[in-house]
Image: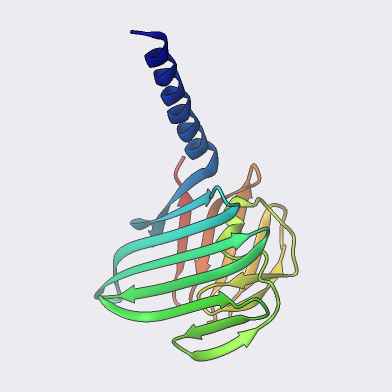
Amino acid sequence: MNKTDGMRKCVIIVILLSCCLYDFAGAETLTYDIILFNTKVGKMVITHETKPDGTDLYDLVTSSKARFLWLDKTNDSKYTLIYKAGKLLSSTFKEIENGEVKRWCNIKFDGAKYLVDSYKGKRTFTDNPGLSTITAYFQGLTKVDRVFYESEGDFAQAEYPEPNTMAFKTSDGHKSIYHYLNNRIDNMEFKISIATVYMVLRK
């Protein structure tokens, strides 16, 4: 092996190591088990990745199957959020129940305002969402007045009933309670009219 070949191999190794280190530092994934009536019925996977251009990409995917009131129900949902410098640029959400689209909501910043296109129709708003129900999983306990709810494209009033706890009731009538441990969401309660669904972080 001559000196030129050796140098070339060293450069390739450095580049590969740099890519690996970037992936390790720039991406983080959290997995939660979905529990209903003390039975595991699915999972929720949330990923945060910081891109080379400084944008933050958040993905959340849930998948569950349960027997509920003598009926078998499957539910799948997917969220994708893009932030840059703390500002939301876009958000997409779709929920599928038993193979049919149940809810959807697309949000895009046009430079002056947010355009919302959802199963409820179209509208606009101007306030930057800041902390959302999804970004909260990677930001620790951050005390804010309200939380952005991607599913409906609106805001929910935040409360802090106990230490290491954040709660909010959304416009669709559901109540969420985030329980923090070591400044991370360790488990979450999702209260609907006839049941409570729990999301528990896999250790």
Residue at image point 32% right, 63% down: 64
2 over 181 or under it: above or below: above
Residue at screen point 53% across, 58% down: 188
Taking the image as shown, residue 72 lies to the left or right of residue 191, namely left
How many numbered marks, from 0 up? 0
Say if residue 193 shows up in the picture.
no
Between residue 182 and residue 9, name the one nearer to us: 9
Question: Residue drawn at (50%, 44%), measured in percent from left and top?
Answer: 27
Q: Is residue 80 left or right of residue 131?
A: left
Q: How is the image coloured?
A: rainbow
Name the one closer to the observer, 6 or 153.
Answer: 6
| Quadrant in which the N terminus appears | top left
Q: Position of residue 96 (x, y in %)?
A: 33, 74
Give coordinates of residue 187: x percent, y percent: 53, 53
Q: Which residue appears at 26% of the width and 75% of the height?
A: 98
- From the viewer's perspective, is residue 86 above or below residue 13? below
Image check: 50 left or right of 195?
A: right
Question: 110 and 35: which one is in front?
Answer: 110
Query: Where residue 137 sits in the image (x, y, percent)?
Result: 57, 54
Q: As displayed, is residue 31 above or below residue 70?
A: above
Residue 155 seen by the camera: yes
